[in-house]
Image (spheres, helix red, strand yellow):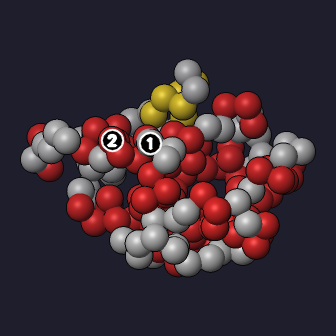
Amino acid sequence: MRVYPVREMPSVTEDSARSVVGTQFTEQEFIQAFEGLTFPGEHFHHQEHIHLAWLYLQQGNTEEATARMAESIQRFATFHDAAGKFHATLTYAWVRLVAAALRRSPGLSFRWFLEANPELLDQRLPYAYYSKTLLDLPEAGAHRVEPDLAPMP
């Protein structure tokens, strides 16, 4: 994993536009489009989930970010006729994983944050903490459950 000194990287306070699915958004515009249900559902993939968690964690603690992420994703999924895709435990796990990475590499722009934490792009990462059997349970999708393989960071 490549690690860069913070002083050489852009900070999260820069007001430069970020590229999301080929469209220029500021980070605040990305949140507004997502929460306002104007962000295209077909373009909300794993990296956008990570970006949203990262943004929410910039604005609140882990519990607040987790609650906001769960509520926002449920609304977004329902609006796009994909309510069955929401998974409470995976949402919790990903926010915790992004929060842990933020503690290791604070003060970075999202681009540099991903450079410093490329493991976050691996969709299998929660399986280091949760068995497939547990994540496949209906209650894990509906409600947050604690990991059965290793504690969350």
In which image quadrant can residue 109 be found? Answer: top left
Residue 123 placed where, x, y %?
51, 44
| Callout 2 crowding tier (Cα within 10 Å): few <14, some 14–19, many ≥20 | few
Residue 97 placed where, x, y %?
42, 61
**110 on left or right of 139:** left
Residue 47 placed where, x, y %?
51, 40
The residue under the point 34% across, 65% down is 100
Up-down: is 63 above or below 12?
below
Residue 72 appears in the figure: no
**148 on left or right of 33:** left
In the rendered structure, find residue 122 and report the number of the disc placed on it.
Answer: 1
Q: CA–CA distance between discs 2 and 1?
A: 8 Å
Up-down: is 65 above or below 37?
below
The residue under the point 70% across, 69% down is 140
Up-down: is 148 above or below 50?
below
**110 on left or right of 112:** right
In-front residue for pair 45/61: 45
In-front residue for pair 31/133: 133
Looking at the rendered image, the disc whose residue lies closer to the viewer, 2 or 1, is 1
Q: Which residue is mark 2?
A: 118
In which image quadrant can residue 70 be found? Answer: bottom right
In the rendered structure, find residue 139 and report the number of the disc placed on it.
Answer: none
Looking at the rendering, in which quadrant would you find the C terminus?
Answer: bottom left
